[in-house]
Amino acid sequence: MALLQIAEITKEFGGLKALRAVSLHLDEGEIVSLIGPNGAGKTTLFNCITGTMPPDRGSVRFNGEEIVGRPPHEVARRGISRTFQHIRVFGQMSVLENVMVGRDFRGRTGIFSALLRPPRVGREEAENRERCLEVLALFGERLLPRLDQPARELSYANRRRLEIARALVSGPKLILLDEPTAGMNPHETQQVVDLIRLICERGHSVLVIEHKMKVVMTVSDRIVVLDHGEKIAEGTPAAIAADPTVIEAYMGGRRRAQAD
Amino acid sequence: MRGLKSIMANSPVLLIIAAFAAVPLFVANMYYLQVLVFIGIYAILALSLNLLNGYVGMLSIGHAAFYAIGAYASAKLTIDLQLPWVLALAGAGAIAGGFGYLIAKPTLRLSGIYMTLVTLGFNMILFLVLQNWMGFTNGPLGIMDIPPPSIFGFALGSRLQYYYLILTLVLLTVFSMHRLMDCRFGRALTAIRENELAAEATGVDTTRYKTQAFVLSASYAGIAGSFYAHFVKYISPDSFTINESFILLAMLAFGGQGNLIGPMVGAAALILIPEIFRPLLEYRMFVYGGILIVMMLVRRQGLFGSRSYRLRLTRFDPSPVRVYQRGDKFLPEG
Amino acid sequence: MPSFIFEQLINGLTQGSVYALLALGFTLIFGTLRMVTFAHGEVYMIGAYVGFEIIRLLHPNFLLALGAALAATAVLGIVVEVLAFHFLRNAPHATSLLVTIGISILLVNLAQKVWGPETQSIPFGLLGRLGDFEINVAGVYITFLQMAVLGVTLLLMLLLYFVINRTKLGMVIRATAQDYEAASAMGVNVNVIYMAAFAIGSMLGGVAGVLVGVYYNLFYPTMGGLYGLKAFSASVVGGLTSLPGAVVAGLMIGLVETFSVEFGASNFRHVFSFVFMILILLLRPGGLFGGREMAHTRGD
């Protein structure tokens, strides 16, 4: 059974069809890339999966359970976490605190235990911290030396890394990455590619939106191509690279863009 | 050894507490002591509003409503039900919190400005009800002869005793809020303020946390109200107008919000400024209005609002703070 | 139907039309700038006092008083816009809101210093015998002042409708309200439009001030507080961006208040508007007539 099974998702924005009956699936341990020209509906699909913006029609089954209509935090609790195209870190909070928020729903400390501080609160906090440091260590020395720095002071690339760390720390089964290499130089991009493989090896499945073809071709097990809200192709990197419809969608898009 | 160490780590706070405890030795004038008591009341109120406006980033502009509910609840409980003050204090907190829940539950799904408007409307409605429900609140005449606080049979009389009582309440407020903010709860609230969408997507149940914050904030205000009622011994709707809510906003604007220092500094400053510059007393509200405008234009985050100050009241991690430098190899053990 | 009901109807409409005028101001300002101003009630109060001073000191002429109030409140509106919005265009919404609260506090206290905290009235007879004059329509008495209030309100509403829908200024205001970036790109000086919206909104408030002041002949520094907030609820009930909505909601609140006195709920008549507001916010955040497009939406 597929880990994520999306069937016939449709989403409209005031008459504009952002997604038309898109279906796709993702198996456990897979890295699937979602590509397509700008405005193809990739981020909208992410929003539909995570409950940020419920779809008009269609179903999203995760681990066999329907998750359409569930609020985002419940979707996250079931094991799907994500990053954002426009970075959304908690600017005033420190790096460590940002990542700790990712552990929030694993915690049991409520108002009363926070006030009374039974020993398990300390244990929980220490365990959270340990997990966070472990995840931050995946990024080498990019984030660890900056544990107590406010996130807003981080560089652009480091903020992207921080978002990934925050998404990883809750131990999700599936992680959705929305353009994780945007704005990064080739060296940093390569690090992200390695990181995505590492994430996969650690037992998380990955669905990634990516524009850089080099990244897509090297990292993906499978590629899904969206154009104008429709799935126009799906297959292995080699198959996609040879697919004439995909080339048309991309080149046509580029031609249109040049004409503008 | 660890005990001593943590005491040393907390010593600045202990020193400040000691200084406040010693204040009456140097301040003989009872009027000054009364001013200090009022600073205490407003410090609790400002801290409670800070929980919403500062930490969660919801703008509540009708906070005096919960202050009023606490005051009236406490007065009614002690006068009509003859409850001892300690119970009335807890009751005031609980009742104000209950109203907070009633307001928060339906309104939190509204976005920003709409929620703010509900808090305003609630303040207005409550004021008008207090003013007009003669049978229960005695209308504009207010409730008189509220008994002084009695703690297990010991009735408070002198200003000095009131001073120590409010000092205790303020400290309790600060310590409890610090405990709340220094763990999962506080992190979640701050995350909601910084980016609600991301917090929600990360698994933070934003509605639940916001409701909890609202209820807590209302209860703290209710407790301040209870103390006020038994300190002044007379309450009327005039003490709880929308103006009172605006004063609290000015305190946060001045001192800064989002930490525990700013609101207290704001409360102290805004009470003290008119007292120190006596001619200003008449222009008190001018000062508050002016402060709101000037602070928003010049220093939006307030004096102490730009960062979170560590009070270091507790430490989870007894090991020394690790300093990482470029080139350090770091691998977590195990 | 007994004639007192008609008289109450007229009373209610008179009262309501003042709320409607103030609510129009709120709506115009919110619609254009997406900003709530809490200084509107105080602008109204200042308008009333200016009218009062003109009548008392200069010339007992109603129209002159109106004109002076219009001028004064237009300037005041621009001052509010500059302080609360112009300098804070990119600040969070709350910042502007707090500035308007600050301005409102300042204006109330300024009025208290200038005119004293006590209620003042135009000396008897200064306005001629206008106040006594009433006409009898089929057994229903309507005073001249009521006619004046209703007439001026109606005239202003028509004028506003005309300006917004039929003039170039109105078109530009509507364009800015819809998308200020696009309007700005089309060469509209958005700053001027914001000031104009604030000035027009404030002038409506100023007129309402003079009308109420003369109608009840009571002027006091805190007169703007409750009126402003009630009119504000009317604006919310009307949908916050709908001008007709503001008018209908204002009239409705005026009528409900007047009739609640008739039915023995006079103590709680001031509560209704706020209860309406909260109910509308909870049940239909888009207002009585609007769609729900302004309600909670979010996206990436």
Image (cartoon, grey):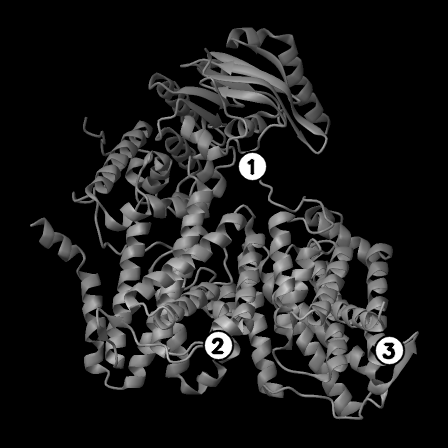
Where disc 1 sits, the SS reads: loop
Residue A195 as seen in the image, left or right of residue B22: right
- Name the residue type under label 3: Tyr
In the rendered image, residues at marks 2 and 3 fall on the same chain: no
> Callout 1, which amino acid?
Asp
**Residue at left 32%, top 75%?**
B37
Left or right: residue C54 versus residue A39 is right
**Quarter of image, res A47:** top right
Question: Which mark is on residue C141?
Answer: 3
Asked whether the beta carbons under mark 3 and mark 1 sit within 8 Å of each other, the answer is no
In this rendering, is residue C220 above or below C103? below
Q: Residue at x 58, y 28 (%)?
A: A44
Which of the chains bears the disc numbered 3? C
Chain on which label 2 sits: B
- In this view, the residue in front, B296 or B30, is B30
Q: Position of residue C272 (x, y in %)?
A: 64, 63
Q: Nearer the viewer, residue A204 or B129?
A: B129
The crowd level at tag 2 (other Cα within 10 Å; few <14, some 14-19, many 20+) is many
Q: Which residue is mark 1?
A: C300
Q: Position of residue B278 (x, y in %)?
A: 41, 86
Question: Seen in the image, is A57 located left or right of residue B27?
Answer: right
Image coordinates for residue A73, horizontal then vertical, percent: 45, 34
Distance in Å between CA atoms under marks 2 and 3 = 48 Å
Quadrant the C terminus of chain B occupies: top left
The reply to whether callout 2 and callout 3 are in contact (CB within 8 Å) is no
Are discs 3 and 1 located on one and the same chain?
Answer: yes
Q: Is residue B174 left or right of residue C65?
A: left
The numbered dot on residue B287 is: 2
Query: How many other residues sit within 10 Å of disc 3, few (<14), some (14-19) or many (≥20)?
Result: some
Secondary structure at numbered mark 3 = strand
Gap in angstroms between the C-alphas marked 2 and 1? 41 Å
